[in-house]
């Protein structure tokens, strides 16, 4: 009598495990999509920082050695570079890190989740060193 009641138990376990494995595969796929989108946004942020670094004020740099951006042009160049490299990406700001002298750009993007995650906001930071004043390789 006990054997009759246990019939079909394995079917329940197999269906349960198939559901769990399906969720795990979906999460792995979603994580891969998010990582790919973040990598693309990171490359766009680096390109935007490089574009913004081209707008260093040469007069200020030659006079004092300080890196100062021509902000409206640098911001516009960063936005254009980010849009070319990652459609839909937006750069919040371009600024100079006072400790390193590098131009830093923060970019944001969004990716639509396939599972129950909805829309996911991604952020990336790019850095570039202005080339003004470099006298030797590696400066």
Image (cartoon, rainbow, N blue to C red):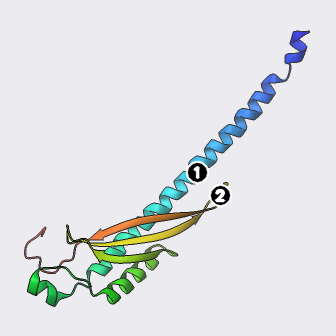
Numbered label tally: 2
Residue that carries the numbered disc 2 in the rendered image = 114
The structure residue drawn at horizontal position 60% and vertical position 48%, both measured from the top left corner, is 27
Location of residue 70 with respect to 43 vertically, above or below: below
Q: Are marks 1 and 2 in contact (CB under 8 Å)?
A: yes
- The image quadrant of residue 66 is bottom left
Which is nearer the N-term, disc 1 or disc 2?
1
64 up-or-down from 37: above or below? below
Secondary structure at badge 2 equals loop
Which residue occupies the extreme front position in the image?
A: 98
Which residue is tagged 1? 29
- How far is mark 1 from mark 2, CA to CA? 9 Å
Q: Residues within 10 Å of mark 1 (few under 14, many from 20)?
A: some
The secondary element bearing badge 1 is classed as helix
Instruction: Locate the C terminus and report the quarter of the image it occupies.
Output: bottom left
Taking the image as shown, residue 76 lies to the left or right of residue 18, namely left
Give me the residue at 34% from left, 77% from top: 94
Tell me residue 48's x, y (percent): 36, 76
């Amino acid at each position: 009598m006990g054997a009759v009641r246990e019939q079909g138990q394995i079917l329940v376990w197999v269906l349960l495990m198939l559901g769990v494995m399906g969720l795990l595969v979906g999460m792995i796929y979603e994580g891969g999509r998010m990582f790919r989108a973040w990598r693309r946004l990171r490359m766009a942020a680096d390109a935007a920082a490089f574009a913004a670094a081209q707008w260093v004020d040469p007069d200020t740099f030659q006079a004092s050695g300080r890196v100062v951006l021509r902000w409206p042009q640098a911001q516009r160049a960063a936005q254009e570079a980010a849009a070319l490299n990652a459609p839909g990406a937006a750069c919040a700001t371009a600024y100079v890190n006072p400790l390193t002298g590098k131009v830093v750009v923060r970019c944001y993007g969004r990716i639509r989740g396939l599972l129950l995650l909805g829309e996911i906001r991604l952020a990336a930071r790019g850095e570039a060193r202005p080339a003004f004043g470099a006298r030797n390789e590696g400066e």
